[in-house]
Image: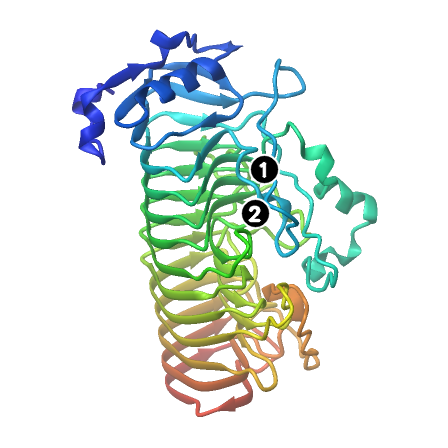
């Protein structure tokens, strides 16, 4: 792509153009081009465009600068170097004090391939590719002393050795990179038209950022896709994200910056998320060999709010998205935050690997002393069509005694289950357990199960199954429910 034909999101950056080859980059796939790439970015700082022509550019950590647009032309690939065989290592994870309330990966940004710390008016544009070949998907868990609800209940069967392989000691992370793109405290960011493969723990992690647009991205990765933590004013649109091992597009509100920050004014629209075999979205084969994610539950690939939820979520819109071979939509608060004013419209789901819809208030309270129980209120889900749903898990709204989910509207919902369930006992509350649709085991009903809810409105619900021994709908401790236009077929 010629730079002159590219509409830059920040037009002032077009005034100065810097080709990375003029700064010594080779793009031969063998030579380390980190220093040359950094020289070009530093030269463009304050207003310029860095152009990466076709080629394979092996790099360790590269730091963005304000008022820089980085353009990866067609055929250009920035390849994450491998500390085990390349002469170098990634930047060390920065020291921001003791990080107790979120995992290592959420708490550090500098140990990444491309880093933007406090930058403004930056863009990373395709149509080129970022290949995280030398990144690791691993990272230790939180150092929270309570250690409740840290891992999904599906991991109880794993040995200590198996967990240690997934969550190595923090000292082992020195020199490793575990994110393709990491942004912290950044403003006015555009990431458009890229392909990201093998993105490590996060293909894109944005924390405490504002004014972001992520558009027309293809992400096919081995753990999380896009993580937006404590962000404001963000648009994610027309992205394809394949993440069988973890969440595809996930909003969080952790304590990573030392304070509770709400995730607010975020729109996700016209995206496709999936849980196909790694790499098979990019190559077009959409493989289905992998059945389980590392947590020993079925493949993931979903849109989610949570699990980190200290600051809460406000004014979230999720529209016209498609879920393929994924766990469905999850809205979770377990660390004291409030989820409110969420509107979900026009979702299509096929081959749903757990529940098509999961709303959960939990009592993990991973946060400082005084952290309370969160709330969910003011959620509308309309125009949801889901087929091929795992028969074990109904669409679930699960609050807690004394902490009901409030004011939820389900409108024009169609759920088709595979069938085959049998009656089960009412599950325990599991208040401080890690939230997952599978946490309760097979749900007591097959279509819709609600417990501890106030103000439920169902306006058009069609439930079908190939045959199930449970009731279709169950309401436990539900106050003020109004269900109209409900049909069921089993």
Q: Nearer the viewer, residue 460 or 190?
A: 190
Task: List x then y, in percent, for residue 182.
Answer: 48, 38
Residue at 52% of width from left, 47% of height from top? 275
Q: Nearer the viewer, residue 270 or 490?
A: 270
Horizontal side of 5 relative to 411 (left or right) equals: left
Horizontal side of 26 relative to 353 (left or right) equals: left
N-term-proximal mark, 1 vs 2? 1
Identify whether 429 is placed above or below 248: below
Q: Is residue 433 visible?
A: yes
Which residue has dot 2 on it? 106
Which residue has dot 1 on it? 94
- Density class for disc 2 (Cα within 10 Å; few <14, some 14-19, many ≥20) is many
Task: List x then y, in percent, for residue 382.
Answer: 34, 70
The quadrant holding residue 70 is top left
Task: List x then y, in percent, for residue 383.
Answer: 33, 68
State the SS at label 2. helix
Task: List x then y, in percent, for residue 429.
Answer: 67, 78
Q: Nearer the viewer, residue 296 or 124?
A: 124
Say which quadrant the N terminus sits in: top left
Residue at 67% of width from left, 59% of height from top? 152
């Amino acid at each position: 792509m010629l730079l002159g034909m590219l509409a830059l999101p920040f037009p002032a950056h077009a005034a100065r153009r810097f080709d990375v080859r003029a700064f010594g980059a080779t793009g031969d796939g063998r030579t380390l081009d980190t220093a040359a790439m950094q020289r070009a970015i530093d030269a463009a700082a304050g207003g310029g465009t860095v152009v990466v022509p076709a080629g394979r550019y092996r790099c360790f950590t590269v730091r963005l600068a304000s008022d820089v647009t980085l353009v990866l032309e067609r055929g250009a690939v920035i390849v994450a170097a491998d500390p085990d065989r390349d002469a170098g290592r990634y930047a060390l994870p920065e020291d921001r004090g003791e990080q107790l309330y979120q995992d290592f990966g959420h708490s550090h940004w500098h140990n990444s391939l491309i880093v933007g710390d406090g930058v403004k008016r930056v863009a990373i544009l395709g149509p080129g590719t970022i290949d995280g070949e030398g990144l690791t998907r691993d990272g230790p868990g939180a150092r929270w002393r309570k250690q409740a609800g840290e891992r999904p209940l599906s991991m109880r069967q794993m040995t200590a050795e198996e967990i240690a392989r997934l969550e190595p000691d923090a000292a082992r992370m020195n020199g490793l990179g575990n994110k393709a793109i990491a942004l912290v405290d950044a403003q006015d960011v555009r990431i458009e038209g890229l392909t990201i493969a093998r993105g490590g723990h996060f293909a894109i992690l944005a924390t405490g950022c504002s004014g972001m647009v992520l558009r027309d991205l293809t992400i096919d990765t081995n753990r999380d896709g896009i993580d937006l933590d404590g962000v404001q004013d963000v648009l994610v649109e027309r992205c394809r994200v394949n993440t069988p091992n973890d969440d595809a597009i996930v909003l969080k509100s952790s304590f990573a910056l030392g304070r509770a920050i709400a995730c607010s004014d975020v729109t996700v629209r016209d995206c496709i998320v999936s849980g196909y075999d790694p790499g098979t979205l990019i190559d077009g084969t959409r493989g289905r060999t992998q059945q389980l994610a590392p947590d020993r539950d079925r493949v993931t690939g979903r849109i989610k709010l949570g699990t980190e939820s200290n600051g809460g979520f406000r004014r979230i819109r999720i529209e016209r998205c498609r879920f393929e071979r994924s766990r469905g939509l999850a809205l979770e608060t377990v660390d004291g935050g409030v989820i409110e004013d969420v509107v979900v419209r026009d979702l299509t789901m096929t081959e749903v690997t757990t529940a098509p819809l999961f709303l959960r208030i939990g009592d993990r309270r991973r946060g400082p002393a005084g952290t309370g129980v969160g709330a969910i209120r003011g959620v509308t889900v309309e125009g949801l069509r889901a087929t091929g749903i795992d028969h074990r898990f109904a669409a679930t709204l699960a609050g807690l005694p004394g902490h009901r989910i409030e004011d939820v509207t389900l409108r024009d919902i169609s759920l088709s289950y595979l069938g085959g369930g049998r009656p089960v006992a009412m599950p325990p509350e599991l208040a401080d357990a890690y939230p997952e649709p599978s946490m309760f085991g097979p749900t007591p009903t097959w279509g819709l199960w609600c417990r501890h809810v106030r103000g439920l409105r169902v306006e058009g619900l069609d439930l079908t199954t190939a045959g199930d021994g449970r009731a279709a709908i169950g309401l436990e401790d539900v106050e003020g429910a109004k269900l109209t236009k409900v049909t069921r077929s089993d």
